[in-house]
Amino acid sequence: MVVDDHQQIRDSLSRYLEKNGLRVTTAKDAHDMDIKRASGNFDLIVLDIMMPGEDGLSACRRITSETNIPVILLTALAEETDRIVGLELGADDYLPKPFNPRELLARIKAVLRRSEKTEEFTGELRGKKVRFEHLTLLVDRQTLTDDTGKETPLTPSEFKLLAALLERPGVVLSRDQLLDLSQGTSLGPLDRKIDNQISRLRRKVEPDILRPRIIKTIRSGGYCLSVKVEVVE
């Protein structure tokens, strides 16, 4: 689904993406997106940040908290803060405007490939439940449950990052190692991707986000899952 308040952008992107083999639905704002999302199944949402009514950041927060649908944000070129906040809220990628449709298509295909591989990626944890602290990861459903039974879905990137940590409790993993294990890529200069993803993941696993004790930051090292892990068959 392409969500943008500019009809020309919606129409031109729809034509281009469909010409390249994708099925596309368009929406003019977040409300329109919700109506169409309720009546269909979508593999990915391209979401503009600057829209009338509910903005793209708020809509992104709702999507990633309720579903595992990947989100690519379209951002104004100068709004670096919006791009960082978007990643922290759960967006899988972003593209600044103006952009080349070929680049958007390449990013869509890359995110979809990662999403498809998520179902296959569970390492030694496939088909199991993993208990740590007050939480249980339902691996095949990519969902967390707490002691009260409350369920919290994980985005594909959050799930793969958490799985990488759960398979190596007590091991200090560098940012490069975590990115390679969870996405098969490496960090670029000043890349904060893993830091942003850890921040998002902590919001779902830490009792106190200001004093994280499950996923600890290791100075000059990286991150470490610092609690015991129990695999339940």
Image (spheres, grey):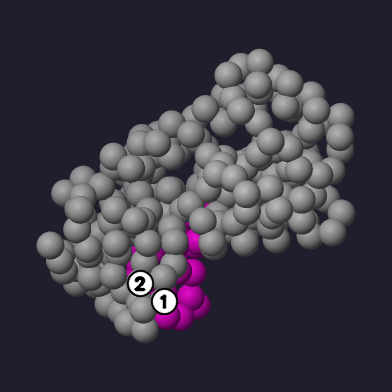
- Residue designated by label 2: 145
Which range of residues does the magenta coloring cover? 196-218
Of the pair 147 and 183, the residue shown nearer to us: 147
Residue 63 in sight from this viewpoint? yes
Measured as percent of width and height from the top left, residue 105 is found at: 61, 24
Residue 190 in sight from this viewpoint? no
Of the pair 46 and 73, the residue shown nearer to us: 46
Measured as percent of width and height from the top left, residue 226 is found at: 26, 69
Q: Amino acid at mark 2?
A: Thr
Q: With 59 as the anchor, is 151 left or right in this view?
A: left
Give the crowd class for mark 2: few <14, some 14-19, many >=20 residues within 10 Å. some
Q: Amino acid at mark 1?
A: Lys
> What residue is rendered at 29% in x and 62% in y?
138
Q: Are marks 2 and 1 in contact (CB under 8 Å)?
A: yes
- Residue designated by label 1: 150
> What residue is rendered at 73% in x and 37% in y?
26
Q: Quadrant of residue 71?
A: top right
Disc 1 element: loop
Image quarter (top left, top right, bottom left or bottom right) of the N terminus: top right
Which label belongs to residue 119?
none
